[in-house]
Amino acid sequence: MSSLGKLMKQASRVQRQMEATQMELAGRLVEASAGGGVVKVVARCDGSLASIAIDPKAINPADQQLLEDLVLSAANQALGQARQISTAEMAKASGGFNIPGLA
């Protein structure tokens, strides 16, 4: 088999692995919290948010800015964790190839 044929076969295998990894990541969840657990955010490792839960004790109209900051903090933590997992898994799936535009 020619070198080009081997390369095409390997590229096809890597593509299948990466597609399977992306599907697995879409179902993988991480959770982060802020304010001692008052705000909890669950994110998918595909970069989307799955849920946000706010303890009713935290809902006080006078503390709107604080609550918004807690939600933002927990969301950013969850998305950061998800991004780290996604990057690591995609690197494994690509076999070390640096493919621009992929996580």
Image (tube, grey):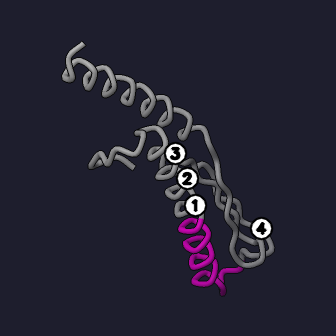
Which secondary structure, mark 3? helix
Q: Identity of the amino acid at label 1?
A: Gln
Residue 38: horizontal and vertical position, in percent?
75, 72
Q: Residue 89 bears which disc, if any?
A: 3
Crowding at label 4, few (<14), some or many (≥20) Cα neighbours within 10 Å? few
Tell me where residue 58 sits by quadrant: bottom right
The residue singled out by tag 4 in the image is 55
Structural distance between the alpha carbons of marks 1 and 4: 22 Å
Q: Residue 31 bears which disc, if any?
A: none
Q: Identity of the amino acid at label 3?
A: Glu
Would you say residue 76 sits in the magenta stretch?
yes
Give whichever of 2, 66 is nearer the camera.
2
Residue 74: horizontal and vertical position, in percent?
62, 69
Q: Which label's residue is closer to the chain start, 3 or 1?
A: 1
Asked if marks 1 and 2 touch (Cβ < 8 Å), the reply is: yes
Residue 27: horizontal and vertical position, in percent?
60, 38
Q: Which label's residue is closer to the chain start, 4 or 2?
A: 4
Q: Residue 85 bears which disc, if any?
A: 2
First to last magenta residue range: 60-77
Which secondary structure, mark 2? helix
